[in-house]
Image (cartoon, helix red, strand yellow):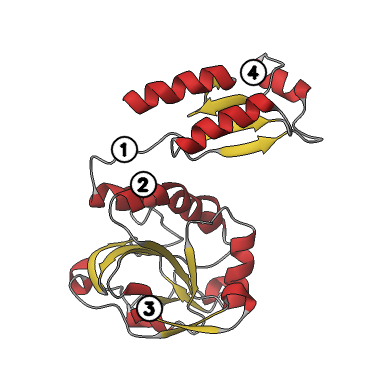
């Protein structure tokens, strides 16, 4: 167990302004100073902080789920979603490159100034990490902390309350969470293009997996029992090809 001091309580942070610091970032591979005013002033912002880029829970669950729910969070009044870690700008940029994180703004707190100001800087020397951020999330309105979810301070890396679903439920308990949509498509296929257009025109986020040396017709037949392209899955359920997708979209739009 680390020798870090006790973490602040959510009640001690809520109602306070975020720490005023300057982040050393490299958007577009050029150095740029980002102030907390630029990130928070006049905005409703969700922040989630984590121990480090490339670490298992952060890469497999924490970041991807916030990215997946980002459109729903924005529909419910959130202007931006920030991921903050005590890593330098080069590490954060490289991590984003390998992640599905286009909906997230990654903020490098390389010196730990913001994290220390939040009272969330903890000792991770037993892992060779030095000082890092404890895992937490918060909703910030116009630079003032409204709500904080802090993981319990115990051995290991607890991940129970700072997740995207918990934050969304706080913002809007009735928010509708869309099921994940995946399409297996073939380049140049007119039916695939038709299905993609129907999904995009109706604002449905989907992951397209095009045919290549790995995803072949044989693989598709092994998964769906069908030879035709595209094949679309929603929440683990096979919807079917282009005609079935158009029917599904029409039904979804009426719901």
Name the N-terminal-most of marks 4 and 3: 3
Q: Nearer the viewer, mark 3 or mark 1?
A: 3
Nearer to the camera, 130 or 244: 244
Residue under numbered circle 1: 176
Name the N-terminal-most of marks 1 and 4: 1
Which numbered dot is residue 110?
none
Q: Secondary structure at mark 3?
A: helix
Which numbered dot is residue 38?
3
Spatial separation of the CA atoms under disc 2 and disc 3: 23 Å
Residue 60: % across, % down: 55, 51
Tell me whether circle 3 and circle 1 mark residues in contact (CB < 8 Å): no
Nearer to the camera, 216 or 113: 216
| Mark 2 crowd level (few <14, some 14–19, many ≥20, 10 Å Cα) | some
Residue 199: % across, % down: 50, 33
Tell me whether circle 2 and circle 1 mark residues in contact (CB < 8 Å): yes
Residue under numbered circle 2: 72
Spatial separation of the CA atoms under disc 3 and disc 1: 30 Å
Spatial separation of the CA atoms under disc 1 and disc 4: 28 Å
């Amino acid at each position: 167990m680390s020798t870090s001091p006790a973490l602040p309580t959510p009640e001690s942070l809520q109602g306070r302004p975020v720490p005023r610091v300057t982040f050393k970032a490299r958007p577009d591979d050029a150095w740029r100073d980002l102030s907390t005013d630029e990130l928070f002033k006049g905005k409703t912002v969700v922040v989630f902080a984590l121990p480090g880029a490339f670490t298992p829970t952060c890469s497999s669950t924490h970041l991807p789920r916030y990215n997946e729910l980002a459109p729903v969070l924005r529909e419910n009044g959130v202007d931006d979603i920030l991921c903050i870690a005590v890593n330098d700008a080069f590490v954060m940029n490289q991590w984003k490159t390998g992640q599905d994180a286009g909906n997230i703004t990654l903020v490098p707190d390389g010196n730990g100034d913001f994290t220390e100001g939040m009272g969330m800087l903890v000792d991770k020397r037993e892992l060779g990490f030095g000082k890092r951020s404890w895992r937490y999330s918060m909703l910030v309105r116009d630079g003032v902390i409204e709500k904080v979810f802090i993981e319990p301070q115990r051995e290991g890396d607890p991940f129970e309350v700072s997740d995207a679903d918990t934050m969304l439920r706080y913002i809007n308990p009735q928010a509708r969470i869309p099921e994940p949509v995946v399409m297996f498509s073939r380049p140049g296929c007119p039916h695939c293009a038709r299905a993609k257009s129907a999904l995009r025109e109706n604002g449905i986020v989907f992951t397209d997996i095009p045919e290549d040396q790995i995803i072949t017709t044989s693989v598709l037949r092994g998964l769906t029992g069908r030879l035709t392209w595209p094949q679309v899955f929603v929440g683990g359920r096979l919807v079917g090809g282009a005609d079935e997708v158009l029917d599904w979209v029409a039904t979804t739009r009426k719901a």
